[in-house]
Image: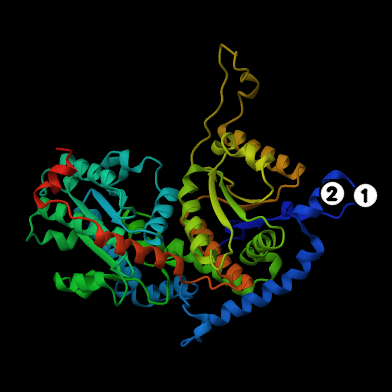
Amino acid sequence: MQLPDENIEYNYQRALAQPAEAWTPLAELQSQHLISTDRFDAFKKVAMDVRGVVGAERELLNPPAKLRPLHSGFIDLPQKLLDQFKRKQDASEVGKIIRISNRLREDVDRIVVLGTGGSYLGPRALIEALCHSYHNEMPAKLRMGKPRMYFEGNNHDNDPLQDLFELLENTCVDPDLTDERWGVIVASKSGDTLETAATYRAVKAEAAKFYGPKSPMLKRVIVPITGAKSKLRELCRAEGYADEDVLSIPEEVGGRYSVFTPVGLLPAATVGLDIRAMLLGAATMTRRFLEEPFDRNPVLQFAAVNYLLTEEQKKHTRVTAVWTRKLEAVGWWYDQLLSESLGKTGRGPTPVTMVASRDLHSRGQQHQDGPRDKMVNNLVVRTVAHPAVMVGMADRNEDDLNQFSRKGLPDLMESAHKGVTDAYAEAARPTADVLLPALTEHTIGQLLQMLMLATVVEGRMMGVNPYGQPGVEAYKSNLTRHLKATPNLPKGEVRDAAKGA
């Protein structure tokens, strides 16, 4: 069991209206725009009851029609994977992921990760949070053999993909040299998401040109991740992939909840991250959710505070303010999780991610003085990983910074956080802090599992099914209809047009 100071916590007191001894303009604003302590205390029982409902859903083998789709398998998955690894080691799913990740590290210097939605945002969130900020630019020796990572297959954007092909064609010339070889991880549960499927076909063609269309290297360096019954799995079988070379997304886990399946774990393991520590963090958060009382339960606290502010205080814009750029992709991941889970039947908060202190100089004015429709959740990491960059003393002091010469950038960031939260509090603008003791595999595991669990709880509070995405299916159907009506590009012009000839 981890030490208590490794736990992440949710500090939500600034979202509550504190009892006032006398009327003041601030007290009036607080009564209008924050949650009253009486209402919050009464709602704790509702939150605990909803926890019981969500917990019981894990046991339903044949859920009633009103609960379908029910993709609650993510809740227990981290602990199941850890238990299986303990029993079976290399023969377990985690063992298989580690084995394939080691093979990729030995075989290639670059990996193109193909996926969209959770299949793209999950691995990107893990890698950007925990890898070197300039991982891809570091020489191989400093990367200790960990491959560079590129993300594609999440868009129909022609030119960036052609730019990637140009990069690979000019840096990867000899397939006999490990440091010039590249591979692919393609993740799609259904296998029919057009962004990923079309990009995969184009990327496979590039790989066949590089290695040779009959090269056995193709199946070593291209790793598919998909559902048990999908077009991608059918394609893999047709191409001669052995079952053990295709990783599986469990049927009971939805795409945006799949970060702790091979979708997130394989890319993370391939760049050397400790996926067992991630799973331990996620499993720890699940235990806290299922066992701890409300006052020690960050999942229930986060869900209750944000539900009440959205539904009762009409704060329909939910800002995730990340206080390190390394968590920006976590914000994007949460944007998708929240939008697809709760944006239904004309309801649901609108998510916005901002990086502090950077975006205080672009959005801060609106958050301070604009429409009172926002709740700000700060993601704050208490400790930095590297020695502090100091302001330092200078011979010229026209910038008036010598007074702060013994301060470091972490001091500036902490002061900025305190300053802006004080300013919001003085204007009765609700904020809360998700506090991470450090940025590690264990804390990231906790954080992502907390946000997934809280989203499901909030959906059940709203009476909205947090699984499935019927609105996205409507878009996909219309896309296919329009695509069939689009004239084909003349066959001989395809490559010339791509090169701008």
In percent of width and height, residue 228 lies at 30, 77
Q: Quadrant of the N terminus?
A: bottom right
Vertical placement of residue 82 versus 328, above or below: below
Vertical placement of residue 266 versus 430, above or below: below
In percent of width and height, residue 162 lies at 22, 44
Please give left or right for residue 175 compared with residue 366 in the image.
left
Q: Quadrant of the C terminus?
A: top left
| Of the pair 386 and 128, the residue shown nearer to us | 128
Q: How many angstroms separate mark 1 from mark 2 (CA)?
A: 8 Å
For the residues labelled 1 and 2, say whether their Cβ atoms are less than 8 Å apart.
yes
Does dot 1 land on a helix, a strand or a loop? loop
Amino acid at dot 1: Ala
| Of the pair 424 and 172, the residue shown nearer to us | 424
**Quarter of the view holding residue 226:** bottom left
Please give left or right for residue 213 compared with residue 11 in the image.
left
In percent of width and height, residue 237 lies at 18, 74
- Report the disc number at residue 185: none
Please give left or right for residue 418 compared with residue 334 in the image.
right
Which residue is farthest right?
22
Does dot 2 land on a helix, a strand or a loop? helix
**Colour approach in the figure:** rainbow
Amino acid at dot 2: Ala
Q: Earlier in the sequence, mark 1 or mark 2?
A: 1
| Of the pair 454 and 68, the residue shown nearer to us | 68
Name the residue located 18 percent from the left edge and 55 percent from the top edge.
488
Which residue lies under the disc numbered 2?
27
- Mark 2, residues whose alpha carbon is within 10 Å: few (<14), some, or many (≥20)? many
Which residue lies under the disc numbered 1?
22
Q: Is residue 141 visible?
A: yes
Q: Is residue 260 visible?
A: no
- Mark 1, residues whose alpha carbon is within 10 Å: few (<14), some, or many (≥20)? few
Name the residue located 53 percent from the left edge and 34 percent from the top edge.
388
